[in-house]
Amino acid sequence: MVVSLEQAISAPFATRQLADLGATVIKIERPGGDFARHYDADVKGESAFFVWANRGKQSVVLDIKNDGDSETFFALIAGADVFVQNIAPDAAERMGIGAEQLHARFPGLIACEISGYGAGGPRSADKAYDLAVQAEAGAFSVTGDETMSKVGFSVADISAGMYAMSGVLAALVRRERTGEGAAISVSMLDSLVEWMSAPLYAAVHGKGQAPRTSRRHHAIAPYGTFALASGKVILIAIQNDREWQRMAEIVLANSGLATDERFATNAARIAHVEETEAVVSEGLRSISDDDALARLAEAGIAIARVNDLADVWQHEQLRARGRFVEVDTSGGPLELLAEPFGISEWSPGRRRIPALGEHDPAVVEGIIGRRKSSDDI
């Protein structure tokens, strides 16, 4: 049983994974609902963000400032296996729902908190949204070209949500073995900086901040997008010098490029990246698209189409593997992506997108009743 006081993306994304894995998830919403419900109305009248992060849950509306609702709220926490929240740290402490506070009060509970900057330190109380954390974590500094850019999806929220979900699962395994609950504290900044480790380490221990490289890889060449003769753009990924040799001999039909000192090693190709890309581009433009693709396949070179979102939705690999499911909403059935876990002999939990306040009273009473029937969880 999971109870969550959550809003926006990071905590809802974590608890959605738990719901996908079969957990009963009770989403506590303020009157008016999670503000992510109102970001847009693009998906059968629902917000795309809310649909993405909240399927499979049940929604309970509580005004926690009201004494009666507050009593229900803490009764739900007391009866849960897991409690997750991502409200401001100072507000959580005042309410008595910080992870350490709840773990001390209910030793068997797994209490997980997600914040922007983590407890302690001068930034703990600062508001933190996805783009703000992307900026703080350096993601902007490595994304884009001459102009820095954000990552085009909620990467800070997702990283924190995944670490929260992983921490909860690990704590559940430990509790199964020892009976001990846990206090879990996850920071969006910590999570995204961890994902930034490779460029961060290279900058700190190497030659400093690398320039942004836009459509190409910053450390491997040729590895990026190239236009074929028709103008169609594909991605080509050369991973080692053997592949470059095959690229030169089979695709570009110029074996001399394999031994040219400007191109023979990856380090040399990076040092001469503009020249490297120029010879690849020139070679691809000199032959037909079909010939280029055939030669790339013969050489065993990895390529990819550069899809837009409509292409992704109709991707033949996703469709052939049944990676879509029908989900119920108050506006009618909806096709969404299936859960990506891929666990054998496993069936996902309920998939409905909950309307505000849509919950099973028997489930709620059952969670509250668990605490009433035991002195501990």
Image: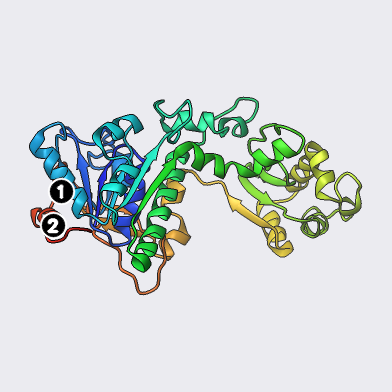
Q: CA distance from mark 1 to mark 2?
A: 13 Å
- Helix, strand or loop under label 2: helix
Q: Is residue 214 above or below residue 53?
A: above
Give coordinates of residue 94: x percent, y percent: 27, 31
N-terminal of the pair, mark 1 or mark 2, is 1
Is 183 displayed left or right of 267 in the figure?
left
Residue at figure coordinates x 48%, y 29% from the top left: 121
Q: Residue at x 68, y 41 (%)?
A: 201
Splitting the image into 4 quarters, where does residue 157 fall? top left
Residue 29 percent coordinates (x, y): 20, 39
Task: Point out the image quarter for the C terminus.
Answer: bottom left
Q: Is residue 58 visible?
A: no
For residue 195, what is the image quadrant? Answer: top right
- Residues at marks 1 and 2 touching, judged by CB atoms closer than 8 Å: no
Q: Which residue is mark 1?
A: 75
Q: Which mark is residue 363?
A: 2
The amino acid type, in three-letter code, at marker 1 is Ala
Residue 86, how many percent across, how many down?
33, 39
